[in-house]
């Protein structure tokens, strides 16, 4: 028996295969080497970086399923000041200038994400401070907006005997995080978010 294939069906299958192949190539091209970009609003700082070599800060990280301690040590870095997470055995830490910036050049984060108790934006706080960042994904020449994050000082208050700025950090569609920032040293005294809490244990 001769098997006959309808030329219309054959043509349709051929077109479908071509479209799949082209679609796959296009998809790979679109998402080749995507990059996350953070655009920051202008930031005016009113304090220099105040941590000194030899200082050490220990924090308790309280999570839903338990807790852990993390210790950050400040050390002399030559032309900068180093900060290292001591529990990270292979980590080299970061090196920041007097404006609190490291090689990443961001006010919102560091090249080493484990450094959580200090961020450069903390050097800009005052009682009316507001700031925002925008996250984008860049691929194939296109810049696609992901989300905005908004920072604001709610008030200045006493926290455990220290003057502190209470800062709210909130994205467009996520729960808020609240940070108590020491007004003198400009480090986190307490961080509280959905499902986690971070508290300075000793310094």
Image (tube, rainbow, N blue to C red):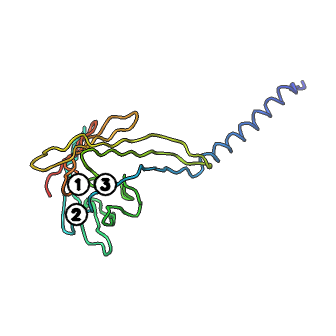
Residue bearing the label numbered 3: 119
Residue 4 point in image, percent of width and height: 88, 25
Q: Are marks 1 and 3 in contact (CB under 8 Å)?
A: no
167 or 12, which is in the foreground? 167
Element on which disc 3 rests: loop
Q: Residue at x 18, y 56 (%)?
A: 184
Q: Are marks 2 and 1 in contact (CB under 8 Å)?
A: yes
Position of the N terminus, as image quadrant, is: top right
Residue 190 point in image, percent of width and height: 20, 46
Q: Residue at x 28, y 57 (%)?
A: 46
Element on which disc 1 rests: loop
The answer to whether 107 is drawn above or below residue 149 in the figure is below
The answer to whether 125 is drawn above or below residue 1 in the figure is below
Cα distance in 3D space between marks 1 and 3 = 8 Å
Q: Residue furthest right?
A: 2
Residue 171 point in image, percent of width and height: 38, 38
Q: Residue at x 56, y 46 (%)?
A: 143
Q: Is residue 18 left or right of residue 198?
A: right
In the image, which disc is placed on residue 51?
A: 2
The answer to whether 82 is drawn above or below residue 143 in the figure is below
Q: Quadrant of residue 158?
A: top left
In the image, which disc is placed on residue 187?
A: 1
Cα distance in 3D space between marks 3 and 2 = 12 Å
Residue 39 point in image, percent of width and height: 46, 50
Element on which disc 2 rests: loop
Q: Earlier in the sequence, mark 3 or mark 2?
A: 2
Q: Earlier in the sequence, mark 2 or mark 1?
A: 2
In the image, which disc is placed on residue 26?
A: none
Q: Is residue 151 left or right of residue 141?
A: left
Q: Residue at x 18, y 65 (%)?
A: 55
Q: Residue furthest bottom?
A: 78
How many numbered tags mark residues here? 3
């Amino acid at each position: 028996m001769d098997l006959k294939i309808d030329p219309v069906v054959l043509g349709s299958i051929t077109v479908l295969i071509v479209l799949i192949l082209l679609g796959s190539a296009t998809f790979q091209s679109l998402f080749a080497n995507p990059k996350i970009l953070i655009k920051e609003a202008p930031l005016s700082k009113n304090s220099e970086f105040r941590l000194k070599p030899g200082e050490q800060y220990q924090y308790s990280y309280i999570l839903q399923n338990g807790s852990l301690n993390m210790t950050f040590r400040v050390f002399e870095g030559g032309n900068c000041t180093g900060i290292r997470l001591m529990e990270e055995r292979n980590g080299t830490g970061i090196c920041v200038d007097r404006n609190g910036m490291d090689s990443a050049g961001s006010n919102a984060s560091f090249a080493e994400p484990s450094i959580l108790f200090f961020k450069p934006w903390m050097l800009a706080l005052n009682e009316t401070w507001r700031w925002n960042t925008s996250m984008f994904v860049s691929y194939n020449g296109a810049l696609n907006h992901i989300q905005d994050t908004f920072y604001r000082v709610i008030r200045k208050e006493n926290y455990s005997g220290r003057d502190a700025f209470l800062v709210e950090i909130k994205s467009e569609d996520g729960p808020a995080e609240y940070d108590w920032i020491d007004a003198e040293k400009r480090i986190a005294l307490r961080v509280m978010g959905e499902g986690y809490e971070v508290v300075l244990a000793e310094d």
